[in-house]
Image: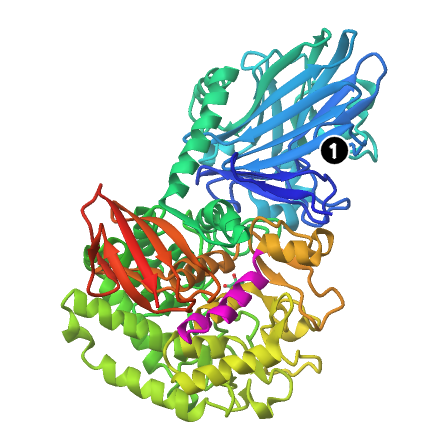
Amino acid sequence: MEYGLFDNKAKEFIINKYDTERPWINYISNGSYCSLISQTGGGYSFWREPKFNRITKHRYDNIPQDRPGKYLYFRDMESGEYWSNGWQPVMKEPEAWQARHGLGYSVITSTYNKISTSASYFVPGQEDMEVWIIKITNNDSKTRKIKVTPYVEFSLFNALDEYLSYPNLRFFCDAEYSKDLNAILYFMHHHSWMNLGKVFMGLSIPISNVTMDRRLFLGKYGSETNPEVIITGKADSKPVYGSDCVGAPEVDLDLKPGQSIEFTVMLGVDNNKPGRVKELMTKYSNVDTAKKEMQAVKSKWESLLGNFHINCPDQDINDMSNIWHQYQLKVTFDWSRWASYYHTGTSSGIGFRDTNQDSLGMLHIAPELVRDKILLLAKNMYEDGHSYHSFFPEGGVADDRKYGDDHIWINTSTYHYICETGDLSILDEVVPFIEGSTGTLFEHLVRSIEYALTVTGHHGLPKMFFADWNDCLNNICLKEKGEKGVSVMVAQQAYQFGNYLLQLAKWSKKEERVKELPAKLENLKKVLNDVTWDGEWYTRAYTDEGRVIGGKESGEGQIFLNTQSWAVFANVADKEKGEKCMDSVYTLLNSEYGIKLLHPPFTSFPMDIGSTIHYPAGIKENAGIFCHANTWAIIAETLLNRGERAMQYYKQILPPLVAKKIGYDRYRVEPYVYCQFITGPDHQNHGAASHSWLTGTAVWTFVALSQYILGVKPTLDGLIVNPCIPKDWPGFEVNRKFRGAEYEIKVKNPNKVNSGVKKITLNGKELSSNVIPVQPAGSKNLVEVELG
Ligand code: GLC
């Protein structure tokens, strides 16, 4: 049954079933304060960064799943009956229920025993807080006395301590009720050392009572399903000093027949600023102001997502691309692989390679944010050209393990940033290296490529070190020192990124600094084709001992997807080899629900592979359908001019489509955002997906669709139009902003071809090539294209 659907008019995703297989969540965030919220009101919040500034708790492996959350309890004071708005946590079957995730907000509505309730959750554009707008309506013919109790469980601010030392550190936690503020204040004894300060949870209407001690709220051996305070209706308002803290303020309402009451719940941080709580609460205690701010958030999102809009013959593609896909691009850009329902927010911060990739998806939305991010990334590079694997921008120990690929990705983000903006000045920005000395961004780029090309192992290919894009190939260089083990994928990427660097050098007249690079790159390409071509596909890696991984003789892991698509994408393969290796992908790796990462899966535990082998066959990096890697196969097929296959690959992993095909229950995760992997055909749960939201799949499917299928690609001199579509598409439209000007691009395909621009006009005048020259900022331009 399809219980999830797009409402394109409202720009919302509607969920009509509360007990989805996995929580279907939304990220509600202004880039600083972040709240994750599921369809049942589960989720957690943090401020600025999820490791040290966690506000509310999430138990990643709780039973039942998805607890605790931002709940709303209701108690009928006459009958003693109680329930919750989101279905969780009381789990009593509502008469009516619906959740709607929107741009920057989520709304859960339900009806139970003639009382209708709704909670609209949002994070205002500027303030470090979240607001819940609550509405309760009495549909009964008699007056109803209802107690409403919003509820959260507070977290240790240091989320890692939650796992490592909670039994001890719980004694750091205090909570007090301020009658004056009409709010609960939660804090650590030593909170004044912390930027976060105190957490507040206040209401816009008078609180009648509060409970702040978890034991007292839940009761002995109680849970959120049957809290003692809700069952008995008797709160305990004692402050808490050194124990488990919750926020459970109560309001007692007498609702006449037909009457509705609205109020707000405000949860946020005071940043140690005296008067801050009062200031925020005064503003958001006004329900109308709160509603206006929520509308402002929605409008802001609408304008952010207005820079790119498509209309193609396939409604599933339009549904996904115009709203949710782009929303996900911003979420991944903001939160990397940091905190989700699948990442605890404690182990890694901003991933160097991940963020360079995520940047590509933000270029059309907010390129100025990408500029800042590239410069931030550059600061996390060593003088020799390699970089941290991941780091915490607010402080904390970076992951210093050396990977073969991390550092070189900065070339692609910078190259694409300059294509989008024309801003060559970024190359001259002076940025410190980790050691303290400084260099221009250009110098950072040069050193990263030099590092890959000079620190080499077998066959003169770049060393793999700990791993490459595939984090789980981490025993190729068994000792992590990478004596000789090399990565073919890194070599292919170095070829592409090195060529980007050459372009940048040319555009900024810095060729002198890289004068030896062209020859080195051509030599690399030669080695790749002489040594790593295995007859029908490219190999994947060579271990320290020299064993070939991903070759015909390799046994398990005989063919890997990435080195086929990257051979084409990076222009390492000629047409013949490109077609051959991508045909091998189709024959050996493709399945109904996407392309497997490798074949055959590892089942005999070869010790020179890495943690891939710990996953059962078909899961994640061990022959799972790693969606992120599928995207490069889409791009490769467009470069081979095979529009049908590119579209097939694209649609195989398009969330709303694949979820419907597999069945929502079997697919499990949200059908409105991309996920990291779908379980492969070698596993009994083929089709089950996981790790939704924070994944490189989001950015690369967007690049694949916008730049390679629809073929509208920014370059320094303007927008190139070079589509590769299925022959039976009659055409499509793209509306795109580029350097401040608007372009309405209408493509017609009367000759039923995959590609080839026969005629292109700009504002009625025919162009001599398919590059639309940059038009003045503020102008509106009509581009008409005929394929043939
Ligand atoms: C995860 C990581 C990403 C890596 C991929 C494959 O998505 O975030 O950096 O490339 O797994 O291992």
Stretch in magenta:
637-654
Question: Dot 1 lies on which element?
Answer: loop
Q: Is residue 191 left or right of residue 461?
A: right
Q: Nearer the viewer, residue 311 or 493?
A: 311
Is residue 648 positioned above or below 473 on the image?
Answer: above
Q: Quadrant of residue 261?
A: top right
Residue 298 belongs to the span the image colors magenta: no
Whether residue 701 is visible, yes or no, is yes
- Position of the C terminus, as image quadrant, is bottom left
Q: Which residue is mark 1?
A: 87
Q: Please rate how many residues cluster around mark 1, counting C-alpha atoms within 10 Å: few if below 14, some from 14 to 19, many from 20.
A: many
Residue 651 belongs to the span the image colors magenta: yes
Is residue 371 positioned above or below 41 on the image?
Answer: below
Is residue 782 positioned above or below 583 on the image?
Answer: above
The color scheme shown is rainbow
Is residue 155 positioned above or below 600 on the image?
Answer: above
Q: Tell me the chief SS of the magenta region.
A: helix
Give coordinates of residue 630: x percent, y percent. Answer: 53, 67
Give coordinates of residue 359: x percent, y percent. Answer: 38, 55
Return the residue found at the far front.
750
Q: Quadrant of residue 456?
A: bottom left
Give coordinates of residue 509: x percent, y percent. Answer: 13, 68
Q: Quadrant of residue 35?
A: top right
Seen at 49% across and 16% down, the residue is 288
Give coordinates of residue 85: x percent, y percent. Answer: 71, 28
Seen at 17% across and 74% down, the residue is 513
Whether residue 436 is visible, yes or no, is no
User: Looking at mark 1, is its residue's CB closer than 8 Å to ligand 1?
Assistant: no
Q: Is residue 474 left or right of residue 450?
A: right
Return the residue found at the far right.
79
Amino acid type shown at disc 1:
Trp
